[in-house]
Image (spheres, rainbow, N blue to C red):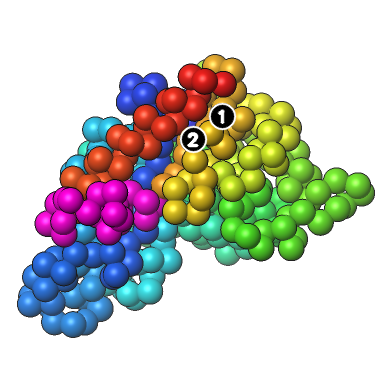
Amino acid sequence: MINRLIDKIQKTGAPIVVGLDPMMKFVPGYIKQAAFKEYGETLEGAAEAIWQYNKGIVDAIYDLVPAVKPQVAMYEQFGIPGMIAFKKTVDYCKEKGLVVIGDIKRGDIGSTSEAYAVGHLGKVQVGSNSFYGFDEDFVTVNPYLGSDGITPFLKVCDEEKKGIIVLVKTSNPSSGEFQDQLVNGKPLYEIVGEKVAQWGAEHMPESGNYSYVGAVVGATYPEQGKVLRKIMPNTFILVPGYGAQGGKGADLVHFFNEDGLGAIINSSRGIIAAYQQEQYAKFGETGYADASRAAVLDMKTDIENALNSR
């Protein structure tokens, strides 16, 4: 799957992942009105609204980017109907040829970790049959519990040729409360990065230079990104924090290797809620998907310019 992601990045020329993190305040009024007319102001109505909103965005951007990243919490808040919308979104994105990164940030041990891995990446056994649950291509995982929490995911990845992306240095302001703490003279995020590199070396695809064990490193910490890029040379880095959280193309060049690969940059509300920004206000509510497309094109240009000038 990592080689498929790389192939898609090279074909689109856009190392970009669109975060499908729908919030009701982002959904245009006319979409909510139609959903509520059919299902009422209910969980089912909310789920229908976010599904239709997602579908419009995906239709507008699927030919421009290699991947999307639905954040499961944005769907879980609407209960079972929300999770149905999550599954419909995953399936639709895959139909459109997009690589799907499930942003689930799971982290547990033993049979619980195995169940998460099976549910999101693998197949669950039901009698003599087996079924995919949510069937994402990659998922994000929290390494705080150590290898016990990661190994079950790696086992499923080996079986399914899929991947995980491990939280290493996250983009939020308080990440340093734990991640920057020194352990034997090193920041904790460096130790996690070293472990990711080790896991990656043990789980390489049959061909290619990049492991299917990736890392999350925030765009808001470019200096740490430089260090981690050296620690994890064969690791693909998912970089959140672009746009709405302050990251910009010039901050990103050190996340990439000399081959121009090795990183994929995430933007969520900067793309999916672009129509609410002054820069794209001309599109209006009914043109929200076109505004998202324009935001992707602008992001692509920003990243290209930064990489060309390094």
Give the image quarter of residue 61: top left
Query: Could you say where residue 154 lies in the image, as x and y percent from the top left?
Result: 59, 43
Left or right placement of residue 64 versus residue 199 in this view: left
The amino acid type found where label 1 is placed reads Val
Q: Is residue 251 visible?
A: yes
* Rendered-image quadrant of the C terminus: top right
Q: Is residue 94 above or below residue 167?
A: above
Q: Nearer the viewer, residue 35 or 148?
A: 35
Residue 189 lies, in percent from the top left, at: 73, 48
Q: Is residue 42 above or below residue 194?
A: below
Measured Cα–Cα span from mark 2 to mark 1 = 7 Å
Q: Is residue 285 left or right of residue 160?
A: left
Residue in view at x 70 percent, y 41 percent: 224
Q: Quadrant of residue 148?
A: bottom right
Identify the element where label 2 is drawn.
Answer: helix
User: Tag 1, which secondary structure?
Assistant: helix
The residue carrying pointer 1 sits among few (fewer than 14), some (14 to 19) or many (20 or more) residues within 10 Å by Cα, namely many
Give the quadrant of residue 84.
bottom left
Q: Are marks 2 and 1 in contact (CB under 8 Å)?
A: yes
In percent of width and height, residue 136 lies at 39, 47
On residue 249, which mark appears? 2
Seen as rendered, the residue at the extreme bottom is 41
Residue at 63% in and 60% down: 173
- The dot on residue 253 is 1
| Quadrant that contains the N terminus | top left
Residue type, mark 2 in image: Gly
> Residue 251, how many percent across, how many down?
57, 37
Q: Which residues are magenta?
A: 268-287
Q: Is 209 left, or right, of 21 in this rendering?
A: right
